[in-house]
Image (cartoon, helix red, strand yellow):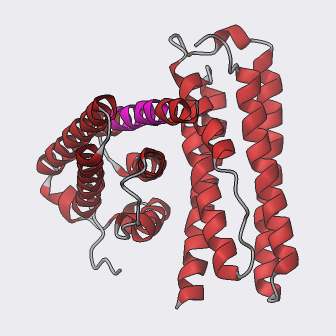
């Protein structure tokens, strides 16, 4: 996949897409969930991803014209290539998941959350303002809490 | 959750991740046929050796002041334990049948390290320690970049 212009706007659009993919995944999984508890957990996770998407949309709206246009390869070539590599590998490739198995769903959920954390960690380096960095940090922290929730649910399945 | 997973254990996991990484790169270097690939994999192994040393030193420096770990509600520890546990849950056969397979495994392992160290940084109390972890994260990001580039060539 080629990026003619890989700028802050593009990065934030990828972040929005990561969240939208995540929310779609959780909703689809919730629809097929066999227990109410599982359904509720998955719906809550979807709701949080919706909020993250809004955070990134808000950040996009606040970009100045200069920030919107400037090629991030000029700003920080390393961070840009790192994020491009992650985006190419995961964001644009949907994996096949057996949605009838809660274990398969949670395993995929964990991979999604870890991918997000790895991507946002690179993004954090590029976001210019302290306020922007704080917002990315907050999203990272919430994704970290999802990792904990998902792992605990996985552990319960094994019992 | 109490102190099931304390700072010492967290460093142990980090050290083990680096050691596994170095071993993986060395054994992959033994499998590939191209000299250039072999050199690259050995180079990566050496960088992971360096990281292991840094974590060792950091763990020693910090153990003297372990009460300073900043994790009031045990939050970072729970996260780190989750990541460490799931690595064990999903322990699987590593595919070394081709350079493409090796690169895919390596990228995944580097990403897992980054995700773990991001949580670790939260727990380390002082600025110098945080900076050291950041430097390692940055190098692992460099590895993801390099490995992804090679993967693109390989698939090209």
Give the quarter of the figure containing the N terminus of chain A: bottom left
The verdict on residue A147 being magenta is yes
Q: What percent of the width, then of the height, locates residue A93?
A: 38, 70
Pick the quarter of the image with the C terminus of chain A. top right
Q: Residue at x 64, y 50 (%)?
A: B90
**In the rendered image of this protein, does residue A43 appear above or below residue A112?**
above
Residue, far right: B30
Using the image as rendered, state which of residue B28 and residue A157 is in the foreground. A157
- What segment is highlighted magenta in the picture? A137-150
Q: In the rendered view, tell whether residue A81 sits above or below residue B50.
A: below
A71 horizontally vs B80: left or right: left
Residue A145 at x, y percent in the picture: 42, 30
In the figure, is residue A71 to the left or right of B132? left
B112 with respect to A55 (left or right): right
**Is residue B46 visible from the viewing direction of this image?**
no
Residue lying farthest to the front in this orientation? A34
Q: Quadrant of residue B124?
A: top right
List x then y, in percent, for residue A45.
29, 37
A124 drawn magenta: no
- Residue in the foreground of this view, choosing between A64 and B76: B76
Residue shown at the point (53%, 82%) measured from the top left? B152
Q: Residue at x 41, y 60 (%)?
A: A97
Q: Residue at x 65, y 66 (%)?
A: B105
User: In this figure, what is the number of numbered marks?
Assistant: 0
Locate residue B44, reporting x and y percent: 75, 64
Is B4 located above or below residue A20 in the figure?
above
Q: Is residue A117 visible?
A: yes
Dominant SS in magenta:
helix
């Amino acid at each position: 996949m080629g990026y003619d212009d890989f700028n802050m706007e593009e990065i934030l659009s990828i972040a929005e897409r990561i969240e939208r993919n995540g929310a779609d995944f959780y909703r689809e999984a919730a629809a097929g969930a066999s227990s109410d508890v599982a359904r509720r957990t998955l719906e809550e996770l979807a709701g949080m991803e919706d909020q993250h998407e809004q955070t990134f949309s808000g950040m996009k709206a606040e970009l100045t014209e200069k920030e919107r246009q400037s090629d991030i390869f000029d700003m920080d070539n390393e961070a840009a290539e790192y994020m491009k590599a992650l985006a190419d590998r995961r964001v644009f490739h949907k994996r096949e998941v057996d949605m009838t198995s809660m274990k398969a769903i949670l395993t995929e959920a964990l991979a999604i959350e870890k991918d997000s954390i790895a991507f946002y960690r690179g993004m954090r380096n590029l976001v210019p303002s302290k306020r922007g960095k704080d917002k990315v940090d907050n999203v990272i922290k919430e994704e970290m809490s999802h990792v904990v929730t998902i792992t605990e649910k996985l552990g319960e399945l094994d019992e | 959750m109490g102190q099931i997973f304390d700072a010492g254990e967290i460093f142990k996991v980090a050290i083990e991740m680096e050691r596994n990484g170095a071993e993986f790169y060395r054994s992959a270097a033994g499998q590939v046929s191209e000299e250039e690939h072999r050199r690259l994999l050995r180079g990566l192994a050496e960088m992971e050796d360096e990281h292991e040393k840094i974590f060792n030193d950091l763990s020693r420096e910090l153990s003297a002041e372990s009460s300073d770990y900043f994790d009031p509600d045990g939050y970072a520890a729970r996260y780190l334990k989750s990541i460490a546990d799931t690595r064990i849950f999903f322990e699987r056969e590593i595919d070394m049948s081709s350079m493409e397979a090796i690169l895919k495994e390596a990228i995944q392992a580097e990403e897992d390290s980054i995700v773990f160290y991001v949580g670790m940084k939260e727990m380390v109390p002082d600025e110098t320690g945080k900076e050291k972890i950041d430097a390692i994260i940055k190098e692992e990001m460099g590895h993801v970049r390099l490995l992804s580039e090679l993967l693109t060539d390989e698939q090209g």
